[in-house]
Image: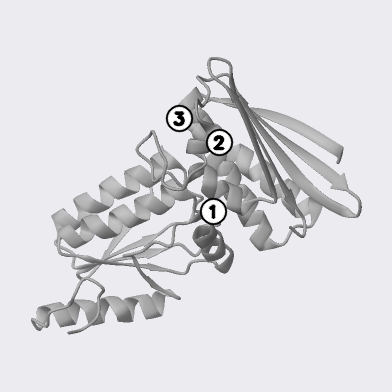
Amino acid sequence: MVTLNKESMSIIREIDVIPFRNRLKEIAVRVGMSLVNQTKIITAASELARNMLKYAGGGIATIEVVTKGRENGIRLIFKDQGPGIPDIKEAMKDGYSTGKSLGLGLPGTKRLVSEFNIESTVGVGTVVTVTKWKHG
Amino acid sequence: MEKIPILRMGDLLLVTIQVDLYDRLAEALEADLVQMIKKTGAHGVLIDISAVSIIDSFMGRIIGNIATMSKVLDAETVVVGMQPAVAITLVELGLPLEGVLCALNVERGMDLLKTKIALKENGLATDPDGDIE
């Protein structure tokens, strides 16, 4: 996977999610994603940004335009310095939630993207990386 | 702060969401709408989301809440105009908006609301699925 372009935004307040979503939309259009795939990645980004705000008090979101072979796509990296997730396997289960949400966040988000990776260390923070291919 | 306007039309409330929702705005709408139902005694709420391009789990939950809260206050809610891409995304996310009445467009949504309200006024019972018994 080769990164063609990269930009980061810090997400500290709920209102920061809007310009982030708008920027992601612009980039998704530029990559040539279908409307359905645009909607999926922006929704996934919205979920992950909310998680970062809710559980870690914010963090850094990075949007990358990536290419692999003949396929283009977008990779998003959400990095926070929050408390970390003690049991990732548990957090990835449908219906699991420590907050007051429906617990759709992580597993639901995973279904919306092509690739999903989460790394978390308790006391250090969490990094969630998702990739959506143009035709994925 | 921005506010989503709620219009009154007879005994219906009309909400057209023209901006992309974020959490606090959606929560404010929920609170305003419930207040308005109480104040006006409205029997129906029509929410037009045709301009909304993103609905994630939080906003989906707010829409579900609005439908449930209005029902408790004796008003029916119909959500109209969902974009196909939003529908696909919501279902894949795992949020099929169960218990929320939907219609393709405002016109059909109005018809659905009027039918629902008329049935209720005529004393015909409806079961929780909304089917006529």
A50 or A19, nearer to the observer: A50
Which mark is drawn over residue A115? none
Which residue position holds label 1? B54
Which residue position holds label 3? A54
Question: Residue extending furthest right?
Answer: A69
Confirm whether circles 2 and 3 share one chain: yes
B5 or A128, nearer to the observer: A128
User: How far apart are labels 2 and 3 at the CA level?
Assistant: 9 Å
A37 or A102, nearer to the observer: A102
| Residue name at image x 75 percent, y 46 percent | A27
Determine the secondary structure under disc 3. helix
**Quadrant position of the N terminus of chain B in the picture:** top left
| Residue name at image x 67 percent, y 55 percent | A38
Compared across the picture, whether B75 is left or right of A49 comes to left
Colouring style: one colour
Snapshot quadrant of residue B75: bottom left
* Within-10-Å neighbours for mark 3: few <14, some 14–19, many 20+: some
Compared across the picture, whether A6 is left or right of A46 comes to right
Determine the secondary structure under disc 2. helix
User: How far apart are labels 2 and 1 at the CA level?
Assistant: 14 Å
